[in-house]
Amino acid sequence: MSVLVDANTRLLVQGITGKSGSFHASACKEYGTQVVAGVTPARGGEKFEKTVPIFDTVSEAVAATKANASMIFVPPEFAADAILEAADAGIQLIVAITEGIPVMDMMRVRFALREHSCVLIGPNCPGIITPGACKIGIMPGYIHRPGNVGVVSRSGTLTYEAVWQITSQGLGQSTCIGVGGDPIHGLTLQKAVEYLHADPDTKAIVMIGEIGGSEEEEAAEYIQSRVKKPVISFVAGATAPPGKRMGHAGAIISGGQGTAQAKIEALKKAGVRVAETLGDIGEEVVKALRK
Amino acid sequence: MNIHEYQARDLLAAAGVPVPRGAVARSPEEAESIARSLPCNSFVVKAQVHAGGRGKGHFQDGYKSGVHLVKTPHQVRDVASHMIGNTLITHQTGPEGKPVHAVLVGESTDIARELYLAIVLDRSSGCPVIVASQQGGVEIEAVAEKSPEAILREVIHPGLGLQPYQARKVSIFLGFPSTGLRAPCRLLHAAYRLFIEKDCSQVEINPLAVTKGGDVVALDAKLGFDDNALFRHKEIQELQDPSQEDPRDLAAAEHHLNYIGLDGNIGCMVNGAGLAMATLDLIQAAGGKPANFLDVGGGASEEMITAAFRLLQGDPAVKAILVNIFGGILKCDILAQGMVAACRTTPPRVPIIVRLQGTNVEAGRKILKESGLPLLPAEGLMEAAEKAVAAAAGKKGK
């Protein structure tokens, strides 16, 4: 078992002919992910690396290859459209890697996705990986190892850091999910925790947050009332300077929420083990599992 | 991205939000002729800088206040001649102040009531939200802390936009009589349209004034824009004023580096915003103070690394540099090559601590070792931070 992706996931890549799209499609394929199709408008009929068929539209790709997940590398100007196209074609898992999508576009996308049953991860995220089975994203595959620790994070490199520490402790990961760093995104920390909690192969959950917004607090509330598995957390930005934030009224909206201190407090109150510094995550996981 | 008050005023006016009459002047002569064209007998002259607290600020040469109220066009000229070409220092500019190249000359307004109105994006609902309060003219954070019930938050449906009943609700909350809702409602719709059309991150009108004559006008406004959407707003990009930016920030922006200048002495170069933030936390946990936040991004090229490195080396406040990289897309060997290239052209002036992990880490470490450069390697995160703090302190002691 795992969360959202496994060895049966059939991946299509939107923007497969671009520089990053082709590089990472290749890396995912090499890792063992079933990359079944690519989509680039006006490039339909071509083949990627001589084996993967390229289509003009997502619906054509789905009809021909039964793809059920999409990884998006389309440039920011066109990324919102790409997400909507994937959802409309019935793709169940959309992983948007693209960084720099206008916030208004994501606001409309999130609204439109209410009518679909799909899960959107990202944008501006590293993706999702079930070690040894399926990698959808830009994370370095080799730092992972199959195991029982679920990881969810708002930051790419912080996820790698946590994963590496877990692997270095001789443990492994069930599934690792990077939800992305944009203010408006799909899958939330809380929802990711819900998935990991429901997964029988996940024995402990690592959740990595950062300043801004209130997702950590919301996840903390859920953890306190529902989660029986040990949760280990780290929140980045405890010493971030005040004033470098969204702006006046933005700070009001979150009122008191949004600072690392508030998040850490909420997590501790929920019984979460909060690592003091970034370097302590791996050891905290070991301690939590030993208990 | 930030813009000047007069630019925000022009954008609001173009969108249909009433603003006081006036115009921007770049010389004392221009200021006087603008004043002569205004049908009023009292004028406001405001120094144009990207900072708040102008009224309470002072100029480099001792001239008081960046906001003056005067009676005659001749006095407007006199005030403008003191401001233009001068440097204004406020509690937001830092001790070095901001250069004044223009002033806004406007009619002075007889104010009956000062209100607060903002449109921002609410992260948790993913919708625009209108924030309104009858307590305008002061910082909204202060209102939120003392009397949160004095603030209304009206969430707007992203598909439908601002509805007339919502505009009425906000206007009534702001104390307008039910027979006088037309002007505030029209203003709300205009401000909302501007927010959406220009991809704003915030439209903040503070104060929104009700004049003694009963008009509603935006006396001062702050507009913020979504940097991600600037590609489709060339007209907004052109409003940028480099003279108001930190030169370190400008140099960083030129090379697409995500940089924020801080006031410590340990320069940092990190990949990924989360790791960069956590690195600042580590430095402070080790007892040091970071000189900057610098995220070279996931896919940095050798040129970007070189530029980032030069930026840190060129900052006189920096006494030690901590490089913390977890190679994902950015491979450790690429990073190492960039650093070596930068050190060849600009020899290291301060100790450099390097902590590498991730893709091609062995190759990266090998390149650094064989370069013969005086780099201090570190394996652990805390170890790296402690070495950087010690190095920065040692340099200071000499």
Image (tube, coloured by chain):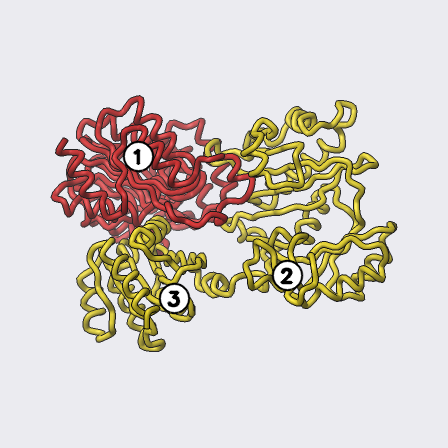
| Chain that is coloured yellow in the picture | B
Figure check: B64 above or below B219: below
Whether the residues at callouts 1 and 3 have beta carbons within 8 Å, the answer is no
Q: Quadrant of residue A230?
A: top left
3 or 2: tag closer to the N-terminus: 2
Q: Are marks 3 and 2 on the same chain?
A: yes
Disc 1 designates what residue? Answer: A68
Give the letter of the chain under mark 1: A
Tell me: B126 left or right of A149: right
Foreground residue among B246 and A106: B246
* A8 relative position to A254: left or right: left
Q: Amino acid at mark 2?
A: Leu
Q: Which residue is mark 3?
A: B318
Query: Residue B107 at what x, y percent from top left?
Result: 80, 50
Q: Does residue A218 lie above or below B54 as drawn?
A: above
Co-location on one chain, circles 2 and 1: no
Compared to residue B130, the image places residue B90 above or below, namely below
Q: Would you name the residue on which mark 2 appears?
A: B88
Residue B17: percent from left, percent from top? 72, 41
Residue positioned 66% across, 39% down in the render:
B191
Mark 1–mark 3 Cα distance, whole angstroms, equals 51 Å
Q: Quadrant of residue B18?
A: top right
Tell me the quarter of the image containing the C terminus of chain A: top left
Q: Which amino acid is tagged 1?
A: Asn
Chain bearing tag 2 is B
As measured in the structure, the alpha-carbon distance from the residue carrying label 2 to the one carrying label 1 is 59 Å
Tell me what hue chain A is rendered in. Answer: red
Question: In the rendered image, is residue A46 in sight?
Answer: no
Residue drawn at the location 64% of the way across and 65% of the way down: B60
